[in-house]
Amino acid sequence: MPLAISRLFRQLILIAIIFSSLLLSHSTHVQAQEPLTTYVTQPPGYSSIRIFDREGRFVGRILPEKRYWTPIDKIPPFLQNALVAVEDSRFYEHGGIDVRGIARALVKDVVKGRMAEGGSTITQQLIKNKYLSGEKSLDRKITEGFMAVEFEKNYTKKQILEMYFNEIYYGNGAWGIAQAARIYFDKYPEELTEGECAILAGVPKNPGRYNPLGDPAKVNTRRDVVLKRMVDLKMISEKVKKKLRSQQVKYAMQSQTPQYLALVKSRLAERFGKDFVEIGGLDIATAMDLKLQKLAEEAVRAGTRKISPELQGALLSLDTSSGDILAFVGSVDFSKSAYNRAMTARRQPGSSIKPLIYAAAIDKGITAASLWNDAPVTYSSGSGAGWTPLNYGGEQLGSITLRQALAHSNNVITVKLLENIGIPYFTEFAGKAGLVLKNANDLSLALGTEEETLQEMVQAYTPFANGGLKAEARAIIRVFDRNRQTTTLEYPSVVTPTISPETAFVTTAMLKDVMTYGTAKSLKKFSALYPSAGKTGTTNDYRDAWFIGYTPQVVTGVWVGYDKPKPGGRGFTGGAVAAPIWEKFMRGVVSARPVGDFIQPEGVLKLTIDPANGYLANSECPKKVEEFFIAGTEPEKSCDKHGGVPLNPDLEEITLPEELLAPTPVEIKP
């Protein structure tokens, strides 16, 4: 109790000091009055920018970023009365401090043995928000009291009330009544109903608890406190209180996917300038699928959190034919980190770069049935030291087909393949897919050492799923101006030929094996139900885990790692970490789409071969597999080690157009 008594005496001293200030107020120097308005008023006719998904479902709003000032005559009298009733019923009687209120709070402090109630007036609250910290101390309270008394000498009650409404915090980033009315009700303050005013008047007491988006029971209880105080003070009748309590207040629909909204906002700012949000009046049709967006956010969050709370992840899903961004995740928790790891962060893609090397080789005439040996080779690094690439785990498979090498993500063979086709050829080939590779003389490119963004990698995979056509990522489809009732801007799909349809199909046929017996064999059941292909990516030190996979309709990439790169430990691989996230998301994708396989171009032959030698198979070959070849690259002779009847038709009887007999270069559109 001594502590409470000590506080009692300090409070009494505060009251004495303030009384003295009031008695001497006629002789106190009055400072020059500060400007009343801190911000400009919002122009009339504003309405929020509304965002919709590809199916026309409401996604959210983009609101003004600037703070706007609301004059007191634009603030409903009901709201003014409600605030005074619940926060400072003697506001129009005291001179900045309420001695009765202090005494009342003083009693509660003593009873509870702590500073439970401050007895602050509206003027004191304004002073605290405008000039002081939120620290609960007697020293701050004394300073606040002196400043409040002085403040009342410089401004009228209406001016103080106006400043209060424009400076106070209403929760969820809403500073001032203009932002609060816009965020919670999508209105100007003068448009607020009495029911809406009753709710907003209760917010300043505890914005985190009583803001309109909080627990409805707590919000309504606080509203009832406001209305009861108004009845007690005879501001409204009991009948009006009952009517307002029974009214169902309708709040503005809140945004559901802040990550995608931030992406749309940045795209609009690039086109219209950063102040476009202050103009408003637009309806934006986006490429997003709202259901898939929510699924993507959940898949990334769950997939990373089960490994480590510090782990980050990103996901990007595109429609293969248009590039529409169906879903996008740049952060596990956007409220804590808004950094866009899908489109901005550059990380080593590891083995997810390999499909482009194999596609370049196929395009150059090398076949999926060609045999390669993964015996390690040492390469000169130019500094006298040698570099000997090894396979994951150090294993050696010996002589295997190119198809098998890609399925098992064989490092040694991939480096040999890159050396065979030539680094300049590959960098030009990758450049057509949108990847700018700077280390043009380094065979380590075969292992994905060049940093790329997830978006760049996913876009580079679109030709495999889309007959050789690369689709650029598109977030916005069109912009409609509600004020002018007209479409102001269309965002067309940007699709460019990059590789031949034949190369795309054969590469996809090889990548299917990744998901059946290769590095992503955990997806075998998925691929059996839904034709799909993809590739894992894991950096040598286990810092980055990737999986990029696709169906004929959708390509999705997943990256997982730490913002401050560090090894995730052995087992932190694309197949173990990123692929499960991909599968959880893609099951939602395929459930709403018809199942279909990749279309085989006319210039691709499907032949039965002996995988031991790559020749056309005979009936007595002990092992036979079907393989795809671009016309003109198929084996010319049958297996000479095993007898029997040839299993393939006489290739000479197959008539193909001349232009399909060999791969032809595709003109790249600017």
Image: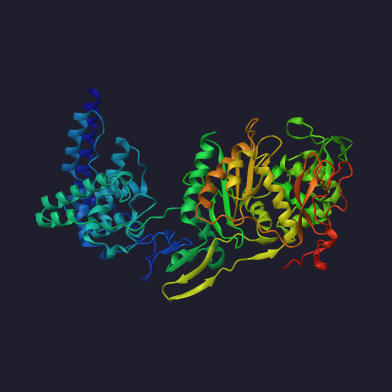
Indicate left or right for 433 with 310 as reference.
Answer: right
Q: Quadrant of the C terminus?
A: bottom right
Picture layout, residue 504 above or below residue 300: below
Indicate left or right for 443 with 565 as reference.
Answer: right
Q: Position of residue 499 (x, y in %)?
A: 74, 60
Indicate left or right for 610 with 477 as reference.
Answer: right
Residue nearest the observer in this picture, 360 or 601: 601
Indicate left or right for 133 with 313 as reference.
Answer: left
Q: How many marks?
A: 0
Residue nearest the observer in this picture, 192 or 322: 322
Residue at the far top: name it.
2
Q: Position of residue 661 (x, y in %)?
A: 83, 63
Residue drawn 40% across and 59% down? Answer: 67
Query: What colour scheme has been applied to the protein in the rendered image?
Result: rainbow
Q: Position of residue 71 (x, y in %)?
A: 30, 64
Visible residue check, residue 562:
no
Residue nearest the observer in this picture, 291 or 452: 291
Residue drawn 32% across and 64% down? Answer: 188
Residue drawn 47% across and 65% down? Answer: 284
Residue nearest the observer in this picture, 269 or 604: 604
Q: Position of residue 19 (x, y in %)?
A: 19, 43
Visible residue check, residue 636:
yes
Q: Quadrant of the N terminus?
A: top left
Residue at the far front: name it.
645
